[in-house]
Amino acid sequence: MTKELELLQSIATRRKTVRRFTTEKPPLELVYKALDTACQAPSGSNTQPWRFMIVEDPVVKSRIREAAETGEKVFYETISAERKKKYNAMGHTWKKPMLEKAPILLVVAADATAPNFRPSVWLAVGYLVLALEAVGLGSVTYTPSEAELVRKALGIPDEYTLETILPLGYPADPKDKAPRKPAKELTRVNYWGVPGS
Ligand SMILES: Cc1cc2nc3c(=O)[nH]c(=O)nc-3n(C[C@H](O)[C@H](O)[C@H](O)COP(=O)(O)O)c2cc1C
């Protein structure tokens, strides 16, 4: 294995979702460095359909939380009791305090007029979460149940979709990383019936 791949793998392996943060505000320079890495992602016809909003203003954060929780309340009312129980056991409810408590919210929007805008933007999000990990910042790719409510609350124009909001900061989340299946378990070779070996 090359040294570069070793480094990449170690960052990917240690990265975990972080939903709780210290109150210390990370320098924006670090966030921009991670965003520059995200901008290196490939995209359909190189259109770079990702757009970012860095939100630090508590007033805007609480507006985001309010819009997001409005959607989450509806979502939690519509799901089955069994599903709700499962989410609750994982610590998820309609309440999203991380949207106010995280020192920074990074909103990721997509230019919906670009070809393959959604896969392109999510590829960039993949680069982004690795880069954030590499600069010591924790994050969670929160996907609001009613993203349109949040998009409108932020005044993001109609031709963009709101894809995710990443609350981010220095990690204060003791939760372990969820285990992963090895690649060979998830791979077939040449034919679907032939497992990876
Ligand atoms: C596309 C996508 C959507 C996600 N949406 C949410 C979300 O809305 N809320 C949340 O708390 N976590 C969300 N997550 C985080 C996952 O729950 C988390 O990555 C997964 O449980 C694995 O845990 P780990 O990242 O700590 O390894 C999302 C992750 C992805 C990739």
Image (cartoon, rainbow, N blue to C red):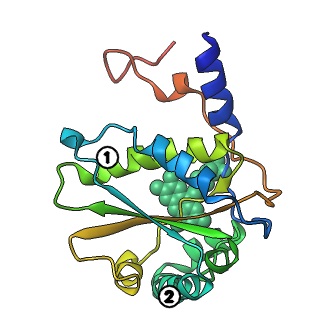
Ligand 1 location (quadrant): bottom right
The residue where tag 2 is placed is: 77
Q: Which residue occupies 56% across, 83% down? A: 65
In the image shown, does 108 or 33 lie closer to the viewer? 33
Element on which disc 1 rests: helix
Q: Amino acid at mark 1?
A: Ser
Which quadrant of the view contains residue 163?
bottom left
Residue 85 sits in which quadrant?
bottom right
User: Amino acid under label 2?
Assistant: Glu
Mark 2, residues whose alpha carbon is within 10 Å: few (<14), some, or many (≥20)?
few
Q: Label 1: which residue?
A: 120
Instruction: Name the residue rendered at 31%, 18% in the picture.
Output: 191
Of the pair 66 and 50, the residue shown nearer to us: 50
Q: Is residue 48 left or right of residue 130?
A: left
- How crowded is the residue under tag 1: few (<14 C-alpha within 10 Å), some, or many (20+)? many
In percent of width and height, residue 5 lies at: 59, 19
Secondary element under disc 2, as helix, strand or loop, is helix
Query: How far apart in space, not on screen, are marks 1 and 2 (Cα)?
Result: 32 Å
